[in-house]
Amino acid sequence: MLPELDLEPALRWLRGARRILVFSGAGISTESGIPDFRGPQGVWRTRDPARYTIQNYRADADVRRERWRDRLDSPIDFARPNPAHEAVTRLQQAGRAPVVVTQNIDGLHQLAGTQNVIELHGTTREVMCLGCRRRSPVASVLDRVREGDDDPHCELCGELLKTATISFGQSLIVEDVDHAMEEADHCDACLAVGSTLAVWPAAGVPVRAVKHGGRLVIVNDGATELDAMADAILAGKAGVVLPALVDALLTQPPLWA
Ligand code: NAD
């Protein structure tokens, strides 16, 4: 029961939206046990993001060792999708959200059964060689790290390996950004969940949706950089708010039916 939560302002826009673009951030996965970056318990409260640039990763073996140790200890491998991820899947299966754009690197949308996920910041479930660009599942490299190879290199070309995530200072994959922007152009509403909407160019996706006439509905437990642009804001935990919102949306016939 959510007596204090008024879904109506959000439903007003989503009911009329044939094509909803879900745009998710780290906050959708905190209830799965994965900390975000900028929330009250965020990783950047205790660490300096400036240390984790691609330049430092290339230059400094200590940074690389730290990143591999962090990856070994990461909660991601044991995390399960939560009711917010499942609600996104229900929305998609009802035909209302064909594509999901995520800043997350945890793969939980896919584990929840969501398809057509654009991972703007890559994935930590794969490893990429910084030389030959070959990608492979992370598990085999983590086995090497566990066995003592604390700065693993590519077995084919000898270059550095890194999780297939986009680090600070690293370019996003152009095709992914273009695809996300195209979806933003064509959506009727962008539903942004669990993001401060502060990381660029990713935050350009909801901005682009608004510029092209889409409505912006935000579900977040805290302020975002784009609150002033939003048509409706639902404050609260994504794992509570999103299932309630999606259930309410799907129990009503869409406005064009
Ligand atoms: P962010 O850390 O900047 O913001 C997260 C927002 O979600 C905050 O406003 C926080 O208060 C809110 N939040 C936390 N828990 C919530 C909940 N249960 N329900 C609703 N809101 C909640 O995250 P961001 O905007 O995605 O951008 C930061 C970067 O973080 C991205 O580049 C992403 O790649 C990276 N990141 C990803 C993961 C992941 O894959 N799970 C985890 C940490 C960081």
Image (cartoon, grey):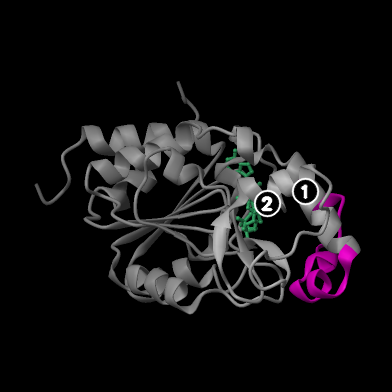
Q: Is residue 6 one of those drawn in magenta?
A: no
Residue 237, x across and y down, in percent = 56, 36
Residue at image x 32%, y 32%?
Answer: 247
Residue at image x 34%, y 50%?
Answer: 115
Residue 211, x across and y down, in percent = 39, 76
- When asked about the image quadrant of residue 231, the answer is bottom left
User: What SS does tag 2 mark?
Assistant: helix
Residue underneath mark 1: 145
Mark yes or no: residue 41 visible: no
Label 2 crowd bin: few (<14), some (14–19), many (20+), radius 10 Å:
many
- When asked about the image quadrant of residue 197, the answer is bottom right
Task: Report the quarter where the N terminus lies.
Answer: top left
* Lateral position of residue 185 relative to residue 167, left or right: left
Residues drawn in magenta: 42-61
Instruction: Give, as a three-letter code, the residue at label 1.
Output: Val
Label 1 crowd bin: few (<14), some (14–19), many (20+), radius 10 Å:
some
* Lateral position of residue 234 relative to residue 67, left or right: left
Residue at image x 68%, y 51%?
Answer: 141
